[in-house]
Structures are given as structure tokens and as C-alpha cells.
Image (spheres, rainbow, N blue to C red):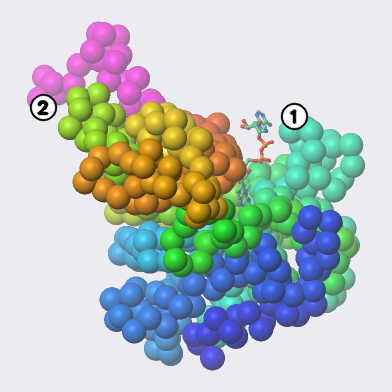
Amino acid sequence: MAIRTVDEYKESLRDGRHVYIMGEKVEDVTAHPVLGPTCDTVGGAYELCASKDPTVRDLYVAPHPVTGEPISRFYITPHTKEDLANRSKMIRRSIEILGDLPFGRDIGTDCLNAAFVVAGKMGKKEYQDNAANFLEYLRTNDLFTCGAVTDVKGDRSKEPANQKHPDYYVHVVDKNKEGIIVKGAKAHITSGPIVNEIVVIPTRQMRENESEYAVSFAIPANTKGVTFICRGGRGAWTEHDFHPDNPIKTLTEAIIIFDNVFVPWERVFMCGEWQHSMLLAYTFATFHRFTAISYKIPLVETAAGCAVAMAKYNGLEKVGHIRNKLADIAAYVETLRALTNAAAFDPVMYGDIAVPNPLIANMAKLHFASKYHSFIELIQDIGGGIIGTAPDKKDWDHPDLHDYLEHYLGGSAKFSTEERMKMIHETMRQTCSHESAFHEVITVHAEGSMEAQKMMILAESPLSRYEEMARRKAGIIPWQGIDGK
Ligand SMILES: Cc1cc2nc3c(=O)[nH]c(=O)nc-3n(C[C@H](O)[C@H](O)[C@H](O)COP(=O)(O)OP(=O)(O)OC[C@H]3O[C@@H](n4cnc5c(N)ncnc54)[C@H](O)[C@@H]3O)c2cc1C
């Protein structure tokens, strides 16, 4: 089986996994009112692979590099800038076609691609084979993965070995001939409870006295000792929502507890090689920020579209200060797009693996995160107070109220009041809701904090070249004229 159906995916989740949400144990994640819609959202990835439109199907399905069998293109390890560009395009198109990102392969392969780079650098054939065999297993069974990187971390000012207890970072507690035993917890893991396999890598550089924390592996989601504690979510649309006809798109995150979990050696990609933990965390961060900037583009395009549309519904599209704000909105979106494309087309090669340009990927993520709240402010400004106070769909449908709302909540005569109400509600979701506040937090933290991006920008930027140019200009070191004259 190379490409699964949505039903096969859902059936595979009924495997006895330990999932909790809002204080309740979940027997079947696919049928749960909050987690069910996340399974449908993530399952959309399988629908893309089954599309009758060849331009869609051929983007998501690629021939296996050896057998030629159809497999998910996410399981093609990037070797060229075209592979990276395709990866970015797959991520963007998912949101354009489905309405949200079906996060079932992206973060796991960010981890796995980094594990490949590091296994190559370590020169450890067993890890290279383990990663290659695991990839082959994913390809053959068309499985979904999550990437479990962020540890719970305890006191942030202390290293893993100096914490109040040893379990704030996932670590190896025992080893035997068959495998290793791990303990700890990873936090905020997107799609964790609704994927098949968990890929684990360290969240940071580990030192010599922390070698037990330098651990990377992959295990099935129903492994004994693994428990998921999910965040609450909104579930399906309600009768209070003005909403599109298609179902809600939503994701879930969870804390994953690893309570003395056994991992067989053939699923281990790092165990104790603390010297290489930095490269693993760093390379993952680069791949993952590239994933991030790719999926952010359609998200900010949609939010920007609310500003364009609300300006029209309010009859203000030709007003000077509104056009000025739309120019700022467009510049924000297009800078993100330009940097994302540049990160794909100027990769760094590790052996035969193409890693997105780390400097540009981090600049793009920092641009996105550091300016997002100002971008949202512009949309809120254009939308007007109604995006905070609009009556809900049940008011609109109420026989005593409908005519009042129809009469008083119109805008530009070019559009119906109902159309304006729909756009008001979409703008509310994007900029003035529980979901939009959640997005503001994701922007700051997901895919690493802004300080993490600045650290990588400093590490990758040619600061000494800048300095040399200034010192030449200042006459501190000799000017290099033509032919040294
Ligand atoms: C919606 C969402 C989805 C996510 N999905 C995933 C996922 O799928 N997989 C995954 O692995 N992770 C995921 N993450 C986690 C994300 O990568 C982290 O939130 C991010 O790395 C920040 O870590 P933290 O949340 O522990 O924040 P903290 O580390 O608590 O950071 C808070 C602040 O403290 C600062 N800080 C932290 N430590 C130090 C220090 N030692 N010195 C100085 N300053 C410090 C940070 O820069 C930041 O300003 C997700 C997060 C969110 C919000």
C-alpha cells in the first residue's frame, strides 16, 4: 500500500492509544467532537493525493526514487532546490485548497530530514540505516508523523542536568540489548494524538554531562507508556457562526508523556552523541522554519484579503489612508513570500541533502513573527469596531431581529448586508477571536521564539565582512583598489 485513503487513515488511529482532552479519556479520536474535526483536517492530505486534478495529485504524489511506486512527495528527501521549492508549494497549496494545513507529515519529516543530515555527519552507519528504514516504512505504509522536539524545560535558566528533577528533558534512563528506555515529556506537539508515529529529537544543544539527553528516535503513537494530553479546541461550526459551507478546519496540540517507554535500537537515530545534538536541533530548526514560512503565506494572504474586502464593504477602498494601510499589508505579505522563495532557491548542501538557506529562512520567520501584530492591527483598523461587536448568526436568523440587522448593518450599496456580515465574521475570526489570539501566540512561539531566530541570524550573517568594509572605509585597514592599487 503506497497511498492510503482517509478511511484507512482514520481506522489506523483506533489502536488503543492513550489520549486525554479536557479531563476525559478519548476512546476514538476520530469520533471526538473536538479531535474528530482535527482528524478530518489532517486527513485532507490523503484527499489531495487522491485528487482527480493531475496538477494537484502530481504535486502531492511522487514516484518512489527506487521502485517508482507512487508515494507521498513529503517522503522524498530534498536533494535539490527544486525539491525544496516543491515542498514549499505543497504546503502552501494545501491551505489554498483545503483551508488549513493538514499537518501530518510536515514536522515529522523536518525532524527526519535533520536526522539524515546528522547521521551522515556522525558517520554512524547504524543510524543512517535506521533513518532510511524508518523512511521506507513511512513510505510503504503512507503513515502520518508528528515532530516532538520542544521539551517541557522546567527552569529555563538551567541546563537539563541542573534541573530540580532529571525529567524536564526527554532522556535515556536505561539501555539493554534490544533497545533503550526513555522518560520525559514534549510539549505543544501539533497533531501528536492523531498521527501514527512520533519522531523525537533534542530541543537544544546538550553538553558532555548531558549525553543521556542527546537522544532521537521514532515510535508508534500507541506505544506502552505514551500518553497525550491535548489542548481543548472549538470543534465543529455552531448555529452561532456565519461560516462557509465546508467543515471547520482545525488542528490540535498535545503534551506527550513518555513514562519509561521502550524504543527498539532499530528506531534510534541518536543515543548519547551529545557533540552532534547542536547540529540536529539547528538543522531541524532550519527545515522547520522553512515549513513555517511556507504555510504562513496563505494564512496571511487570507487575513490581508479581509482588509481588502472590508475596505470595499465599508465603501472606503479609494480613501488615501486606507490605501496606505493596504500598501503596508501587501508589503508585509510579499516580503514573506520573497524570502521564502529565496530560502528554497539558495540551499545549503549537506552531502546530497539540500537544506533551506538558514539565514534567509530565519529572516523570513523573524519578519513574519515580529511584524504580525502590527499587520493584524492594520486589518482591525480597516475593519472597524463591528469586527468586535457584530451580532451572531442566530440573531441574524431571528424573526424579530433579522429586518433590523438587514436594514442597519449594510455598508456600500454594491454589496448585500448578508455578504458584509459574512466578511465581518471572517475578519472577526482572523483578528478578534479566541482563534486569532491563539494565532498571535503561535506567531510568537511556534517554530521557535524570535530570540532563537535572532541567534541563528547572528550565527549565519557575515558580520566580519561588514566590519572589514567599515574598517577599510575608515582607513583603519588599507583600501583594496583595482588590482590592489
Ligand atoms: C501552536 C503551537 C504549535 C507547536 N507545535 C510544535 C510541534 O509540533 N513540535 C514541537 O516540538 N514544538 C511545537 N511547538 C513549540 C514551540 O516550538 C515552542 O513554543 C517554542 O520553541 C518556545 O518554547 P516554549 O514554548 O517552551 O517557550 P519558553 O522557552 O518558555 O520561552 C518563553 C520566553 O523565554 C525565552 N527564553 C527561554 N529560555 C531562555 C533562556 N535560557 N535564556 C533566555 N531566554 C529564554 C524565550 O526566548 C521566550 O522569549 C508549538 C508551539 C505552539 C504555540
Q: Position of residue 86 (x, y in %)?
A: 34, 65
- The residue carrying mark 2 is 483
| Crowd class of label 2 (few under 14; some 14 to 19; many from 20; radius 10 Å) | few
Q: Nearer the viewer, residue 46 or 258?
A: 46
For badge 2, the amino acid type reads Asp
Q: Nearer the viewer, residue 466 or 63?
A: 63
| Crowd class of label 1 (few under 14; some 14 to 19; many from 20; radius 10 Å) | few
Viewer-nearest of discs 1 and 2: 1
Q: Residue at x 30, y 39 (%)?
A: 411
The residue at label 2 has a CB less than 8 Å from ligand 1? no
In the picture provided, is 188 more to the left or to the right than 393? right
Where on the picture, by quarter, is residue 200? bottom right
Name the secondary structure under disc 1: loop
Q: Specify whether residue 470 is painted magenta.
A: yes
In the picture provided, is 357 more to the left or to the right than 8? left
Q: Ligand 1 shows up in which quadrant of the image?
A: top right
Where on the picture, by quarter, is residue 424? top left
Tell me if residue 389 comes above or below residue 17 in the rendering.
Answer: above
Tell me if residue 30 comes above or below residue 168 in the rendering.
Answer: below
Tell me if residue 410 comes above or below residue 287 in the rendering.
Answer: above
The residue at label 1 has a CB less than 8 Å from ligand 1? yes
Query: Disc number at residue 457?
Result: none
For badge 1, the amino acid type reads Ser
Q: Position of residue 37 (x, y in %)?
A: 60, 66
Q: Position of residue 74 (x, y in %)?
A: 46, 70
User: In this orientation, does residue 257 appear?
Assistant: yes
Where on the picture, by quarter, is residue 99? bottom left
Q: Specify whether residue 355 is painted magenta.
A: no
Query: Disc number at residue 157?
Result: 1
Q: For the magenta stretch, what is the residue range?
A: 460-485
Name the secondary structure under disc 2: helix
